[in-house]
Image (cartoon, helix red, strand yellow):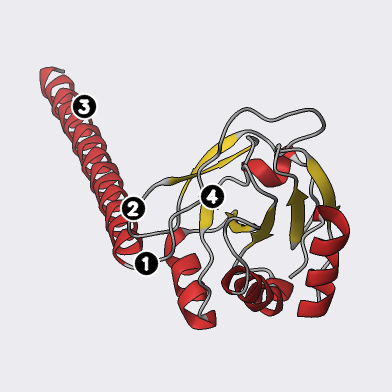
Amino acid sequence: MKAPRLLRSRRGVRRVRGGLLILLLAVLVLSGCAAEDAGADDRGSTAAAEKLPDLTDCPAPTGQPGGGETLTELSLPCLDEGGGQLHLGEAPGVPMVVNLWATWCTSCRDELPLFSELYTTTDRDQLLVAGVVTRDGAGLAAEFVADLNVEFPSGLDEDGDLYAGMGLRGLPGTFFVNADGSIAHAELAPIFSYDALADLVQQHLGVTV
């Protein structure tokens, strides 16, 4: 009778040891995955930072907005190797055109050169042009900007806070903002030509380009 009890006891010990070994292996595997994931995220962030283009600094606001509806108040990191931030929802001091874009937006590829031309052909004391990279990453956005030879500054809105705050349902979207920060017009459809963009600037901001 004693031998069977001893045998059962040894089997129980083996089961416990086996269970502990499986548990230990599971913990090690999970720890390894977490470490690899963290390392991948860090490498991605570093790579994105190294690829940021050298654009003109994001425009700085001049004060609190006046009356009327404004853009959602946000401070977004500028898509620029020099750093800085794009401040929205404040008074820009001069009329401003804000274009929301993303690398996954097909129409944005056609639109961005138009805004870049608007930026390079107007005086900063007359009109400001800025973009907002929406629900997209810095690395992809930087490649997109370089591919299209875009020069105007953009803020990075990876979570789409402006997109959600303004109730948008798709891209592209362009806001024409008065000097006091109030929204003069929202164009929530693609703009197909420079002449059409210039007409919108003239009509809603009173600036001839």
**Labels in figure, total:** 4
Give the mark, 4 or 3, whose residue is nearer the N terminus: 3
User: CB under 8 Å between callouts 1 and 3?
Assistant: no
Amino acid type shown at disc 2: Asp
Give the mark, 2 or 1, whose residue is nearer the N terminus: 2
Looking at this view, is 54 or 76 the one in front? 54
Mark 1 sits on what residue?
Answer: 54
Q: CA distance from mark 1 to mark 4?
A: 20 Å
Q: Position of residue 37 (x, y in %)?
A: 32, 51
Q: Which mark is residue 41?
A: 2
Q: Position of residue 93 (x, y in %)?
A: 62, 42
Looking at this view, is 153 or 102 the one in front? 153
* Element assignment for label 3: helix
Q: CA distance from mark 4 to mark 2?
A: 15 Å
Amino acid type shown at disc 1: Asp
Closer to us: mark 2 or mark 1?
1
Mark 3 sits on what residue?
Answer: 12
Q: Give me the residue at 39% from left, 47% from top.
A: 84
Amino acid type shown at disc 3: Gly
Name the quadrant of the N terminus: top left
Mark 4 sits on what residue?
Answer: 158
* Element assignment for label 1: loop
Q: CA distance from mark 2 to mark 1?
A: 24 Å
Q: Give me the residue at 55% from left, 39% from top.
A: 61
Q: Give me the residue at 57% from left, 73% from top.
A: 120
Give the mark, 2 or 3, whose residue is nearer the N terminus: 3
